Image (cartoon, rainbow, N blue to C red):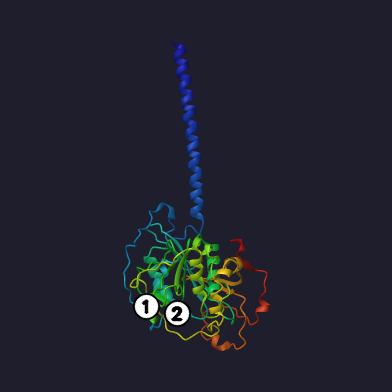
């Protein structure tokens, strides 16, 4: 009798020991999990949402964002200041033009990249219209204005490559929308997202009577996922001046057996801000010849050959402003006063001679 009692007691002790061990193991795991999630939450990049709520605990956002308005009223002939825009959309933004929805987990993390020089008035309109659109589209996004420093020949494509690299240094973006600063969508159903194939968004621009000018066009506003962009080695860095770089990208895409995806011509309507041709951005006379060389050049000219120097990174509430030296040749016929006319509200350093600019802080994206 006593023996049975003892063996029962031993069994009970053994059982409680196992229970205790299990409990310890479980709570240890819990602790590990909670430490991991705590780390995530305290990471400033991860808790970028205005409410500070961790994105992980939210349900994914709907495929079709529920609060879209469809056709929008867009008007550029008004006096609008950056402060107006800050008052208008600022309360919803984080420094650097960052936003994420608070009620659901965004489907994509989108870096919007704007190649830029001396178009502050256009940027104001762009920010005024695009921030509310991107918010309604429930994107986890950031706006990166990549500003070419100095008076050298403009290089739109290189600025976009730089935007890709610099945005990725800040956050784990998975989609990259490259947008001209003078293009504003007039339908918010045109989602600034990436899809299975590189996407051309500005398909029906008022300047071209809302007609796609040609089938392979990829300029204006386009979206590539990180994988798609890496697959084509980014844009070419060697298109100086106006034209060709977008067609070169279009060819890269087809050489890598991808297609161009587009919204329909009603959803894809845009208004372009009217402007004169910029100085130091004349049509590139070599562009036609260069487009015959895309196939042989694309593996050696792109992200893996990108060289530039960051002059300044400035965080505004509405955008991240990255001023870069793209190592351009300086046009000898530069009219400096013309270039500096509307620069007063932005501080950038201007350099005349590129050979002075070789600095130790040259970024090379070969590390990618
Ligand atoms: Mn334009």
The disc at residue 122 is 2
**Relative vertical location of residue 42 with respect to residue 311 in this rendering, above or below:** above
Labelled pair 2, 1 in contact (Cβ < 8 Å): no
**Relative vertical location of residue 280 with respect to residue 37 in this rendering, above or below:** below
Q: Is residue 168 visible?
A: yes
Q: Would you say 332 lies left or right of 116 here?
A: right
Where residue 172 appears, as percent x and y from the top left, is: 50, 59
Sequence-earlier tag: 2 or 1: 2
**Mark 2 element type:** helix
User: Which image quarter: residue 312?
Assistant: bottom right
Q: Nearer the viewer, residue 186 or 251?
A: 251
**Relative vertical location of residue 361 with respect to residue 148 in this rendering, above or below:** above
Crowding near the residue tagged with mark 1, few <14, some 14–19, many ≥20 C-alpha atoms within 10 Å: few
**Relative vertical location of residue 285 with respect to residue 40 in this rendering, above or below:** below
- Give the Cα separation between the discs numbered 2 and 1: 23 Å
The disc at residue 49 is none
Residue position for label 1: 211
Where residue 95 appears, as percent x and y from the top left, is: 48, 67
Question: Mark 2 against mark 1, which lies toward the viewer?
Answer: 1
Q: Would you say 133 lies left or right of 114 here?
A: left
Q: Is residue 154 visible?
A: no
Where residue 303 appears, as percent x and y from the top left, is: 57, 66
Where residue 353 appears, as percent x and y from the top left, is: 65, 81
Q: Nearer the viewer, residue 165 or 10?
A: 165
């Amino acid at each position: 009798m006593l023996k049975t009692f003892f063996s029962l007691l031993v069994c009970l002790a053994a059982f409680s020991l196992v229970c205790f061990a299990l409990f310890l193991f479980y709570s240890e795991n819990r602790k590990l999990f909670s430490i991991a999630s705590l780390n995530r939450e305290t990471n400033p990049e991860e808790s970028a949402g205005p409410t500070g709520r961790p994105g992980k605990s939210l349900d994914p956002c709907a495929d079709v964002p529920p609060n879209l308005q469809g056709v929008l009223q867009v008007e550029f002939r008004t006096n609008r200041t950056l402060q107006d825009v800050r008052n208008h959309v600022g309360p919803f933004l984080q420094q650097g033009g960052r936003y994420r929805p608070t009620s659901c987990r965004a489907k994509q993390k989108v870096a919007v990249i704007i190649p830029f020089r001396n178009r502050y008035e256009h940027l104001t309109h762009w920010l005024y219209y695009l921030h509310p659109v991107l918010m309604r589209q429930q994107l986890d996004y950031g706006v990166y204005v990549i500003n070419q420093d100095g008076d050298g020949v403009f290089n739109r494509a290189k600025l976009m490559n730089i935007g890709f690299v610099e945005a990725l240094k800040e956050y784990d973006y998975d989609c990259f929308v490259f947008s001209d600063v003078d293009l504003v969508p007039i339908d918010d159903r045109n989602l600034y997202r990436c899809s299975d194939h590189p996407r051309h968004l500005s398909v029906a621009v008022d300047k071209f009577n809302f007609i796609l000018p040609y089938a392979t066009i990829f300029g204006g506003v386009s979206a590539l996922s990180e994988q798609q962009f890496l697959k084509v080695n980014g844009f070419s860095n060697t298109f100086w001046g106006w034209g060709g770089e977008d067609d070169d990208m279009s060819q890269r895409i087809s050489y890598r057996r991808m297609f161009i995806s587009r919204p329909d011509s009603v959803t894809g309507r845009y208004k372009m801000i009217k402007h004169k041709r910029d100085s130091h951005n004349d049509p590139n006379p070599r562009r036609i010849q260069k487009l015959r060389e895309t196939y042989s050049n694309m593996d050696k000219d792109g992200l893996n050959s990108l060289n530039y120097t960051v002059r300044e990174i400035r965080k505004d509430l509405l955008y991240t402003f990255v001023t870069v030296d793209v190592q351009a040749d300086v046009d000898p016929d530069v009219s400096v006063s013309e270039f500096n006319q509307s620069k007063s509200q932005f501080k950038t350093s201007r350099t005349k001679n590129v050979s002075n600019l070789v600095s130790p802080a040259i970024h090379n994206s070969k590390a990618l």
